Image: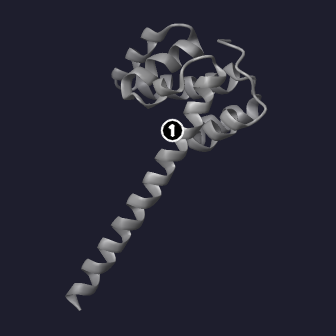
């Protein structure tokens, strides 16, 4: 009986890893398409810190603002504002902005493959 809990833990861990990997791949695909819509090469979306710099440049017009994510508490506010501004930079309304804030991987796919066009920093 003691092995049953170990198998259950391994199964949960494998399932969690699989779901996390799927979400990561979908996020990368959506970001790649968003970058190409904004006139940036898609490969910039897969470089970890550089993609944040480019996204802040696309959303705010100032790439250096991603450094504000290093400040505790401020990073929460900046992250929410950043996600909201992503929706606005691609011409979305309140609905897509809320989707960006709460379900960003889905929002990246919607913005990347939907009828949204990059209009620049707001």
Residue under label 1, please give it: 28
What is the secondary structure assignment of the residue under circle 1? helix
Relative image position of residue 94 (x, y in whole percent):
75, 31
**Left of 62 or right of it: where is 16?**
left
Residue 36 screen position, x and y as percent: 61, 24
Instruction: Say which quarter of the image contains residue 14.
Output: bottom left
In the depicted structure, whether residue 7 falls above or below residue 64: below
Q: Residue at x 62, y 21 (%)?
A: 85
Q: Is residue 51 above or below residue 4?
A: above
Farthest residue in the bottom direction? 1
The N terminus appears in which quarter of the rendering?
bottom left
Q: Residue at x 45, y 23 (%)?
A: 52
Q: Is residue 122 left or right of residue 13?
A: right
Number of numbered discs overlaid on the protein picture: 1
Residue pictured at 67% horizontal, 13% vertical = 120
103 vs 24, left or right, is: right
Q: From the image, which quarter does the C terminus lie in?
A: top right
Q: Is residue 68 above or below residue 30?
A: above
Q: Is residue 23 left or right of residue 15?
A: right
The residue most toward the left is 2
Q: Residue at x 77, y 28 (%)?
A: 93
Q: Residues within 10 Å of mark 1 (few under 14, many from 20)?
A: some
User: Looking at the picture, does residue 9 appear above or below residue 53?
Assistant: below
Query: Residue 87 in the image: x percent, y percent?
Result: 67, 27
Residue 117 lies in quadrant: top right
């Amino acid at each position: 009986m003691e092995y049953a809990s170990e198998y259950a833990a391994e199964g949960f861990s494998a399932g969690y890893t699989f779901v996390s990997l799927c979400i990561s791949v979908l996020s990368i695909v959506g970001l790649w398409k968003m970058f190409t819509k904004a006139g940036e090469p898609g490969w910039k979306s897969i470089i970890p810190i550089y993609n944040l710099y480019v996204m802040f440049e696309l959303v705010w017009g100032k790439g250096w603002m991603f450094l504000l994510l290093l400040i505790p508490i401020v990073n929460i506010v900046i992250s929410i504002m950043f996600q909201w501004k992503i929706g606005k930079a691609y011409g979305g309304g309140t609905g897509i902005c809320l989707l960006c804030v709460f379900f960003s991987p889905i929002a990246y796919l919607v913005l990347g493959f939907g009828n949204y066009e990059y209009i620049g920093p707001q």
